[in-house]
Amino acid sequence: MSIDTMLARLDDPKPNGRDRWRCACPVCGGRNRSTLSIGVGDTGAVLLRCWKEGCSPEQIAHAVGLELEDLFPPRETHGAPLKRRRLITAGQALEVLDSEATLLVLCASDMAKGEQVDRDRLLTAAARIAMIRDEVRA
């Protein structure tokens, strides 16, 4: 399957760099137009990463009427292993970290004052920071 087939099945994907797009995750995205990163790997595989709920590539593929194996081109039987391609740039990772760190500081300040904070949003921030960590380590 080509990346064009996947992009045609998603809701208005926007270019986000060379061989990268962003759109709402078809599983959990709702109105947020940047919850899903789509990329093309060095082997031609379609790469998917949900930044909202961490939906699996299999869930995302099923949501658009595909199977997980549809995201991969026929496997080569020779050659050296190819280097993994990142779904986001270092600059994009820093933007996410900056945003989530700011949220955490504001929530900590509110908690110190005894004010109510959105616990679910704090957990989402922690999950997004963990996803960035995992992406950088991969």
Image: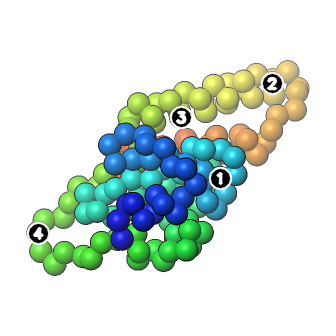
Q: Tell me the element at label 1.
A: loop
For label 2, the crowd category at 10 Å Cα-Cα, with few meaning under 14, some 14 to 19 and many 20 or more, is few
- Viewer-closest of 81 and 2: 2
Residue 82 location, quadrant: bottom left
| Separation of residues labelled 2 and 3 (CA atoms) | 21 Å
Check disc 4 and give the amino acid type: Gly
Give me the C-alpha separation between circle 4 and circle 2.
55 Å
Q: Give the amino acid type for the residue marked by disc 2 in the picture.
A: Asp
List the residue tagged with mark 4.
79
Q: Separation of disc 1 and disc 2 at Cα?
A: 28 Å
Residue with the mark numbered 1: 29
Disc 4 and disc 3 in contact, CB within 8 angstroms: no
Q: Secondary structure at mark 3?
A: helix
Amino acid type, mark 1: Gly
Of label 3 and label 1, which has the lower sequence position? Answer: 1
Mark 2 residue element:
helix
**Residue 76: mark in rendering:** none
- Which residue is depicted at the point 12% across and 74% down? 78
Left or right position of 17 against 116:
left
User: Is 41 on the left-hand or right-hand side of 63?
Assistant: left
Vertical placement of residue 68 versus 82, above or below:
below
Residue position marked by numbered label 3 in the rendering: 96
Q: N-terminal of the two: label 2 or label 3?
A: 3
User: Which residue is drawn at the image coordinates 51% and 49% (left, top)?
Assistant: 13
**Can you see residue 136?**
yes
Single out the mark in the foreground, 4 or 2: 4
Do callouts 4 and 1 mark residues in contact (Cβ within 8 Å)?
no
Say if 118 sits above or below 107 in the image.
Answer: below
Question: What's the CA distance linking mark 3 and mark 1?
Answer: 17 Å
Near mark 1 (Cα within 10 A), the count class, few <14, some 14-19 or many ≥20, is some
- The residue mark sitting in front, 4 or 1, is 1
